[in-house]
Amino acid sequence: MTINVLFVCLGNICRSPMAEAVFQHLVNEADLTDQFRIDSAGTGNWHVGEKAHPGTRQILAEHGIAYNGRARQVTRQDMADPHTYIITMDKSNSDDLRRVFGPHANQYRLLDFARETAVTDVPDPYYTNNFETVYQLVTDGCQGLLETIRQREGL
Ligand code: 4NP
């Protein structure tokens, strides 16, 4: 059985591509690549087709993590499977998804899973330019998310 994980932010160029890349990296390191299908998307459509933000690409490269994705917008189909893990970056992403698509049975904020921080929303580096802080928060959340999924799914 494949476990689907979709990371969602506003533009799909800064935070959710970073989370997608970091989570894929952790899954690969754990030898679980075949068990997962991992993707990201934005609630907005402004950046559809664009590469990740240079700040995201740089911080991933600094940490030896590959990423080649292009931005896309969340679709109704993305939200159709109640087993897909829908992982948002902040409360406004969660609210936007609920407003557009209705409640989803398996939707969380990434930092619900973080162990090292009490911060609940990943700040938007499009405005703060602080990609290092975002990387630390995203990594904390992704580590906790993978542990939680492994327990829940028996991996
Ligand atoms: P992201 O950052 O949601 O982390 O990809 C943003 C990127 C673009 C915009 C906002 C946030 N924008 O307004 O264009």
Image (cartoon, rainbow, N blue to C red):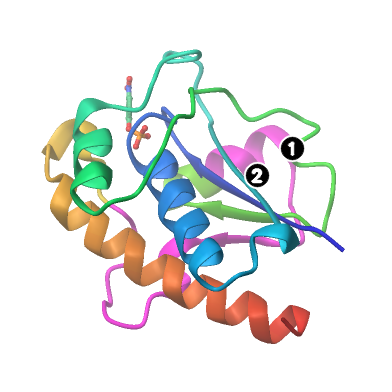
Q: Nearer the viewer, residue 9 or 28?
A: 28
Residue 89 can be seen in this image: no
Q: Which mark is residue 78?
A: 1
Q: Residue at x 41, y 27 (%)?
A: 11
Q: Which residues are magenta?
A: 95-122
In magenta stretch: residue 121: yes
Q: Which residue is mark 2?
A: 98
Ligand 1 placement by image quarter: top left
Residue kind at label 2, given as amino acid type: Arg
Q: Is residue 103 left or right of residue 40?
A: right
Q: Is residue 131 above or below residue 114?
A: above
Q: Residue at x 44, y 30 (%)?
A: 68
Q: Is residue 121 left or right of residue 21?
A: left
- When asked about the image quadrant of residue 35, the answer is bottom right
Mark with earlier residue (2, 1): 1
- When asked about the image quadrant of residue 61, the answer is top left
Q: Is residue 59 left or right of residue 5?
A: left
Q: Are marks 2 and 1 in contact (CB under 8 Å)?
A: no
* Secondary element at tag 1: loop
Percent of width and height locating residue 59:
20, 45
Q: Is residue 147 above or below residue 72?
A: below
- Packing grade of label 1 (10 A; few <14, some 14-19, many >=20) is some
